[in-house]
Image (cartoon, rainbow, N blue to C red):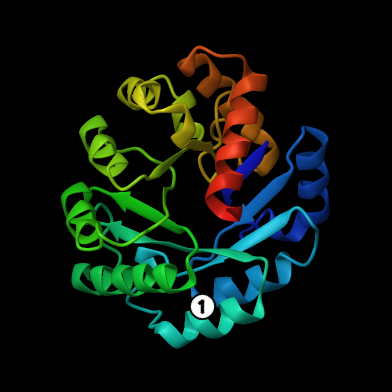
Amino acid sequence: MIDSHCHLDHEPLFSDLKNVIQRSKKIGVKKLLTISTSIESFSRVKEIVNKDEIIFGTIGIHPHEADKNNVNSEFFTKNLNQNKKIIGVGETGLDFYYDNSDRDKQIESFKIHIKAALEADIPLIIHSRNAEEKTYEVLNEYKDEKLKILMHCFTGSQKFAEKLLKFNSYFSASGIITFKNSVDLQNTFKSLPLDRILIETDSPFLAPVPNRGKKNEPSFIDFTAAKLAEIKGIEKSELIKITTNNFNNLFFN
């Protein structure tokens, strides 16, 4: 299994990293992708990726942090050249639900990240909440480019997913798909092509059933894999094989 999106620099994971990694390996996790959300976060990610061979990282500014973290192309180029285990740009995108940052600033930051991903030819990890129309509008500006897109913790509509498939996007399922009230999302993932799906924890957030309400960690990805296999009507072992291949195709091809 591969946890395609976790935040190992967040507590309580960071202070218990050795045990978190051990528990992950014990249930069969082969890779962990720890995600940058700010300049400060990235400084920790750079250290964490060297803690174990299964850990990889990204470079990026979460839309919540767009007001407080100004970055440019040099920030990405310099750090990507220096860190071979940094394999993605993000998480970036638009969050019009919380509006923790000015919307225009979010859009500006999103576009800087897109250009950095294109220049480095590595995947772009996108967060989109209550911003389907604008997210698509921005991505459509780059429709003729060869963007590698991963829609992290996808909770969007089926119509949005269908539009994003035109960009050859991948979609990552989080513990939300295990929630009883997530029928629409489950149906969306049921409709997505098998070669376009990944799994993630988004830990320490969004722990899946039966651990909902607890602090999430990468080892809980087993529950998300089991539920997604059920949704897709295949064995969990097959689902794990497919999502692992998808991750490796996206990030290492």
- In terms of depth relative to the viewer, which is nearer, 195 or 136? 195
- In terms of depth relative to the viewer, which is nearer, 141 or 136? 141
Q: Residue at x 55, y 60 (%)?
A: 35
Find disc 1 in the rendering and name its residue: 39
Q: Quadrant of the N terminus?
A: top right
Q: Which of the 4 quarters of the picture holds residue 243?
A: top right
Q: Residue at x 26, y 35 (%)?
A: 162
Q: Classify 171 as above or below 52.
A: above
How many numbered dots are placed on residues in this image? 1
Q: Residue at x 67, y 66 (%)?
A: 85
65 left or right of 87 in image: left
Q: Classify 156 as above or below 45.
A: above
Near mark 1 (Cα within 10 A), the count class, few <14, some 14-19 or many ≥20, is some
Residue 247 placed where, x, y %?
57, 44
238 left or right of 96 in image: right
Residue 253 placed where, x, y %?
58, 53
Q: Which of the 4 quarters of the picture holds residue 217?
A: top right
Check disc 1 and report its element: helix, strand or loop.
Answer: helix
Residue 117 placed where, x, y %?
43, 68
Res. 49 visible in picture: yes
Residue 233 placed where, x, y %?
50, 12
Res. 203 visible in picture: no
**Residue type at numbered disc 1:** Ile
- In terms of depth relative to the viewer, which is nearer, 149 or 158? 149
